[in-house]
């Protein structure tokens, strides 16, 4: 119809065509998008409007006053587009659920928390929040101050009895995004990633056939990270999660794990440490460990991450440089020896590629895999097309 405009968007894997009157404003479009997709107008962002030079980063935000007053017909490329634009947004019920979870009083410790505190005291750990330490209430970076960052965050929906709750996972995603090293790297390379999400802890190390640590969808459209331990009772070591995030950010440029990928991944690790001057400054390190040692007891990742580093390239300086010329198996043995464990596990790296008929999205996966039930553990890092686990 001549008196109507059509806008084509994709939201959470589905495509929608919304029709509005020819004189409709952007806020009217937002209301129609909410009716069609369920995404609240307050959280909506339409990405990829590169022809609209007056929009910041090519992003149309119906809840922003400057964008809401615009006429839909005045936004170049928005109407009657053959290629759909990506719509980011969350339902009002999801936002309310996260807000309610954030208000739960977690100050009353249970038996498991008391046991954990006892183990930490025996190991000589000191609480991060004691004595002016780092607080866990870090919010996401402002897109006004940091235009190159993540636009949306999504934690895994877990039952109410699971601790840490979804609100704690969301705070961890915010902490990763606000990490000075990650902010510096993304700003330097001018990367904006629409979604940073938590993925389910798929597989158990030492038990399951494979264990996915993270994946990158369509070279920077989405990044999903494994935050939780196998038993869902805590989070993985923060430094390891950040290392996986840098690995997935490298996939914004390079898909296969070739020489160019390893070189860029090594460069990102160096840059991350340089930008994170507080953690790397005087007094940030302690003998026998790093400033990022986890308060939680997690499964052993040293062998797997040693092989990951071998596939991702090595940064200059430090212990990683000393192991740069080691094979993945030797690096794994060295990591195990550093922990006082007999290096009986042999680790190697290899790349594979496969296709799934269920999805056309290119997903780069960081995976720990055991090839057969009676063979040693191997780290498998593959670039493949598959359907990511539903969150």
Image (cartoon, rainbow, N blue to C red):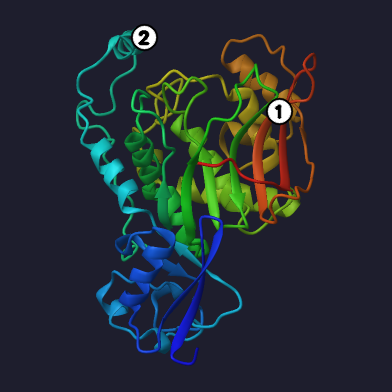
Instruction: Indicate which disc residue 369 carries.
Output: 1
Kindly identify the residue that appears in the image at 66 percent across and 48 percent down.
364
The image shows residue 325 at horizontal and vertical percentages of 74, 34
Instruction: Give residue 156's quadrant in the image.
Output: top left
Across the whole image, how many numbered discs are drawn on residues? 2
Residue on which the image places disc 2: 119
| Residue name at image x 58 percent, y 47 percent | 248
In what element is the residue under mark 2? Answer: helix
- Which of the two marks, 2 or 1, is nearer to us in this view? 1
Counting from the top left corner in percent of width and height, residue 89 is at 40, 58
Image position of 140 with respect to 80: above or below: above
Who is closer to the viewer here, 268 or 100?
Answer: 100
Q: What separation in Å lies between label 2 and label 1 (alpha carbons)?
A: 30 Å
- Residue 375 lies, in percent from the top left, at 80, 17
Q: Secondary structure at mark 1?
A: strand
Few, some or many residues within 10 Å of mark 2 (<14, 14–19, 20+):
some
């Amino acid at each position: 119809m001549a008196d109507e405009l059509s806008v084509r968007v994709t939201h959470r894997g589905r495509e929608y065509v919304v029709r509005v009157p020819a004189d409709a404003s952007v806020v009217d479009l937002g209301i129609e998008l909410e009716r069609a997709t369920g995404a609240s107008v307050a959280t909506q962002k339409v990405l990829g409007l590169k022809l609209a030079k007056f929009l910041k980063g090519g992003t149309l935000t119906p809840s922003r006053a400057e964008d809401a007053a615009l006429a839909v017909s005045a936004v170049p490329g928005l109407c009657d587009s053959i290629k759909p634009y990506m719509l980011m947004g969350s339902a009002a019920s999801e936002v309310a659920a996260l807000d309610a979870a954030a208000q739960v009083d977690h100050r009353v410790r249970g038996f498991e928390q008391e046991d954990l505190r006892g183990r930490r005291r025996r190991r000589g750990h000191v609480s991060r929040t004691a004595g002016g330490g780092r607080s866990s209430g870090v919010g996401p970076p402002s897109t006004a101050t940091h235009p190159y960052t993540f636009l949306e965050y999504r934690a895994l929906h877990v039952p109410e009895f699971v601790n840490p709750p979804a609100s704690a996972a969301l705070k961890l995603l915010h902490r990763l995004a606000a990490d000075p090293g990650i902010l510096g790297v993304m700003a330097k390379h001018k990367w904006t990633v629409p979604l940073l999400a938590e993925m389910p802890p798929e597989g158990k190390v030492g038990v399951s056939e494979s264990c996915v640590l993270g994946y990158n969808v369509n070279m920077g459209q989405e990044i999903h990270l494994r935050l939780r331990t196998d038993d869902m009772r805590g989070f993985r070591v923060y430094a390891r999660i950040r290392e996986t995030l840098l690995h997935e950010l490298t996939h914004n440029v390079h898909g296969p794990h070739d020489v160019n990928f390893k070189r860029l991944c090594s460069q990102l690790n160096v840059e991350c440490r340089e930008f994170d001057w507080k953690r790397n400054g005087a007094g940030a390190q302690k003998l026998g460990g790093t400033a990022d040692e986890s308060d939680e007891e997690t499964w052993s990742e040293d062998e797997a991450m040693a092989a990951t580093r071998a596939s991702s390239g090595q940064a200059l300086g430090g212990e990683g440089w000393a192991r740069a010329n080691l094979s993945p198996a030797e690096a794994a043995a060295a990591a195990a020896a550093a922990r006082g464990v007999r290096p009986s596990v042999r680790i190697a790296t290899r790349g594979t590629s496969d296709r799934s008929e269920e999805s056309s999205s290119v997903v780069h996966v960081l995976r720990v895999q055991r090839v057969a039930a009676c063979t040693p553990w191997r780290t498998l890092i593959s670039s493949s097309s598959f359907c990511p686990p539903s969150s």
